[in-house]
Image: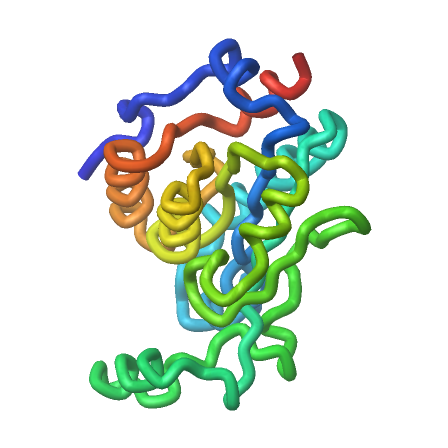
Amino acid sequence: MADVAELPHVDAAALKEMLPPGRTALVVVDIQTDFAAPHGLIGRHGADMAPVEAVVDRIEGLIAAARSAGATVAFMRVVTRPETDSGALKTLYARRGMPGGQAICRIEDGGADYYRVAPKPGDIEIEKLLFDSFHGTDLDQQLRARGIESVVMTGVSTDCCVDQTARSAFHHGYHVFVVSDACAAYEPELHSGTLNVLQKNCALLTTSDAVTAAWAA
């Protein structure tokens, strides 16, 4: 298992040139009840949510730093209803012996609600059905309309929606940065392993302190 601290990270001095606020978006992925709150679906099933709480603390600081510097803030959120469930996802859960297991982030029971963070007027807000925030949404169009060239990825979970959105951003031509201490997975090895794969293939890693310092400068 890769040690996150030993993976290559970009420091604040280099980030200052790489992340000009006017051309950069801070992307906040799935900080919502079922994925991040102790009382949400994942928490009720016994996951240790303490690492997620620490990540949300850092994301709150990054949101403040982005807004102060003039960077775009973009909130991603899974919003599902029974009638919008993917057939492939339903079949996958059924074949795992977990029929109905796809029922997460339901709008009617509050599972899709934001947790501790929320968009403000002028922010980008994307509702999606699955993992990739670009798939079936207008995220690419909204970013391009603002002249965004780089995305700074944060959120949960590192191995799922953060990973797939980061890969898709790269395939759409964006410069991708993943804030290693502002993402979390529910299993430590999935967090570190995913960061290792992303930095090998399509992203640069950095830290919340480095991003904050670069934008403060």
Q: Could you tell me residue 197's position as x and y percent?
A: 24, 40
Q: Nearer the viewer, residue 63 or 164?
A: 164
What is the x, y in percent for residue 86? 40, 81
Residue at x-position 72% and y-position 52%: 119
Q: In this view, does 149 lie above or below 44?
A: above
Q: Which residue lies furthest to the top in this view?
A: 13
Choose between 147 and 47: the one closer to the eye: 147
Horizontal and vertical percent for residue 39?
57, 68
Q: Residue 126 occupies which quadrant of the picture?
A: bottom right
Residue 213 vs 80, above or below: the answer is: above
Q: Which residue is drawn at 62% across and 78% down?
A: 107
Position of residue 147 relative to residue 125, above or below, is above
Q: Name the residue rendered at 54%, 48% in the picture.
A: 53
Provide residue 128's location: percent of width, then percent of height: 53, 67
Give the quadrant of the C terminus: top right
Q: Is 213 placed left or right of 1 in the picture?
A: right
